[in-house]
Image: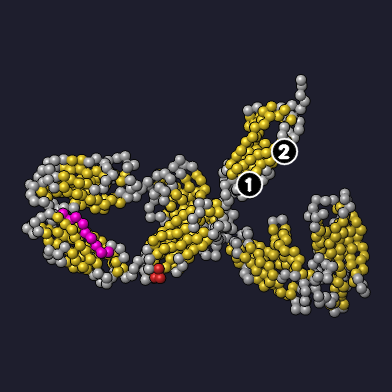
Amino acid sequence: MSELIITFDKESPASIDETINIKAISEGNEELEYKFLEGVPGERNLVWKQIEDFSDNSVCKWNPKNPGEYMIMVQARDKSSGFTNSRRMKYIINGIEENGIIEVNNKNSKLIRDVAIDKTNLTLGEKINLDVLSEESEELLLYRFWIRGIQGWELLKDYSTENKLTYTTTKVGDEEILIECKRPSSVNNIDDFITIKFKVNEQPVLEINSFSCLSESLLVGEELIFKVGVNYEKTRTILYKFLRVDLNGRISCIQDYSTKNTVSICEREKGKYKILCYVRDIFSNKAYDDRAAIIYLVKPYEEIKIRSFSSELSSPQLAGNTVNFKSSVIGGNEVLYRYIVEGPVAEDTGYIRARNFSWDTKAEGEYKIILKVKDISFNEGYEDSKELNFKIDKKGEKPVNILEINSSKTRGCIKGEPINLKVKAEGGTQLLYSFIVYKDGVEKERSNYGTMNWVNFTPEDSGEYEVEVRVIDKYSSREYDAHEYIFFKVKDYQEAEIDYLLLSEKEFYLVGDIIETELITQNTKNVLLRYVTKINGHEVEDTGFINSKHVKIKPKCPGKYTFEIYAKNILCKDEYDAKKEVSFYVNEATPVTNTKIKSDVLEVVAGKEVTFEVNSEGGKEVCYEFYMMEKGNWTRVQPYGRKNYYTFLPYRSGDYRMLVLSKSYYKKVNYEDYTDIEFTVKPQFNVE
């Protein structure tokens, strides 16, 4: 039966000479009869007297005879079922004397002294905190909380001794909370009540103010990271959803609504793509509060650029000599090189993979050497080119050529420690050597030409050093006949180097396995290491730089695990000196294998049940799906489930075949293993 409500046309207390209308309200659709009673306090208990017996009338006139504190009770009875419900309410009647109204002594009717509320003006989604303050004379009270809804009062919290309430606002507008209070021993439904009003305002307008790609280059196969920025207060919770539009216009969701405002993807084909971002407040009732799109072009490789193109020998050279040309190219996946010689004797190598070109000079004259480069996938002429002018004179003595430069150090150069250079050259009549030292592109010192083919130089500061070695014939009129550069990176300390990264030797890692890594580094005492752990490309742990060379992890979930290890000397001011990375897969369980079927009978007969039981090895929470072939048609007879058997009742004889697919429950595949069995159903009766 629906809840019963009692109302009065006059508020309590009323005077003894007034007629009071009592009204009973039921929120249901039942056909009810109502009975009204008044409870008058006696010596020990209430004395109940009938005001009006059961009738269809839901309103009763009440004329109390004496002042006092009354208890009004209404009983409602369902005409069809006879079920009875009742509700009580307290009402006070004051008496009248010649000089005024006699108020009935009702010291205990007021239980709620005040309500402490932290705020009355809120933003949607904020919480309101209420603290009900009772009269000091009351030791123990019960409290009930309601919120005004569309259909009336909705219960938030039923009667309990808890006098505090925290409520999260979910709609905009004027709100009202009803607090009811009573004593545990009271027979009344309510002894006292109070209402609290407050206002809920809309959230500020949410707008996307930035949408950018954080990756420096947008290449096929590389991780692309996109980040969205919005104008919101830190107290608000914002949700982000990302959709990707591919080359064919197909839309896929790459991240459903979450608090993560970045998303990473990896494109497998070149072309133009689009990412849509939808944002909304977590308490918003809209599909989204704002949206934005970004269009990006994914290239198959970095743009090809020729950094340098030079000859080992300076121009002019003598006819008959071989001139080697070197090039340095950045970008591309697989670069092709084409060398074209224009002059008295022309030459064209066509596109080749060799980055160096040896030119055998045959005749004197003015020449132009052209280098063209492109990626092997590029279908047009070329992507970049450079050219050099070169002069060939009549054949003379063997030209000067630098064969090699030996350095005592190439890596790990530290300021204050000397570096020895020794040059090996050929040609000419008598060779002279000069050494020029540059730091950060600025010349610091040079030696005049002399017969010594070695030099010691000591870098006084850290930085990038470049030493140019020049060789000239004693009788040459040129600035130099041959020259080469050697580069050094000098630091204040010995750079950290990761020699080896040792990983537990296992072919198959499972969740719960202990995986150990060990780093072998030089200058171990002065090296700090930082371990970054990623699962499926998402960073889950960053140890920062620590002194430990061992790391143990115990995977709790399956996926692709990646360790990025950064090493640096304790004096390093850069982010790191060296980096290594290792990846491996952790599986939830071993694959499902060796699936087998067996039946509970040796001979299958029409009209008799046969049960096929399946067992597998490996896997986790293995599920099975059963198919039956009858008369050449496959029928799925039992979908995937943990049930590893199937009971079959054949109605007709003939040849049958059963197929069982098996997989672990968590695997997002059609199956991991399968097996089948063929059997013949014999007729129930043999007819001879």
User: Horizontal and vertical percent for residue 469?
Assistant: 18, 60
Tell me which amino acid carries mark 2: Asp
User: Horizontal and vertical percent for residue 574?
Assistant: 36, 66
Of circles 2 and 1, the one toward us is 2
User: Pointer 2: what residue?
Assistant: 600
Main SS category, magenta section: strand
Callout 1 secondary element: strand
Q: Residue at x 28, y 62 (%)?
A: 410
Between 190 and 586, the one lying in front of the other is: 586
Task: Please tell me whether residue 380 is drawn above or below residue 431 in the rendered image.
Answer: above
Task: Please tell me whether residue 127 is drawn above or below residue 395 in the rendered image.
Answer: below
Among the two numbered marks 2 and 1 on one chain, the one whose residue lies closer to the N terminus:
2
The stretch in magenta equals 401-409
The outermost residue toward the top is 688
Q: Is residue 179 visible?
A: yes
Q: CA distance from mark 2 to mark 1?
A: 21 Å
Q: What color scheme is it?
A: secondary structure
Tell me which amino acid carries mark 1: Val
Q: Residue at x 41, y 60 (%)?
A: 500
Looking at the rendering, which quadrant does residue 573 occupy? bottom left
Callout 2 secondary element: loop
| Image position of 57 (left or right of 473) | right
| Image position of 276 (left or right of 679) | left
Which part of the image, by quadrant, shows the C terminus?
top right
User: Pointer 1: what residue?
Assistant: 622
How crowded pointer 1 is (Cα within 10 Å; few <14, some 14-19, many 20+) is rated as many
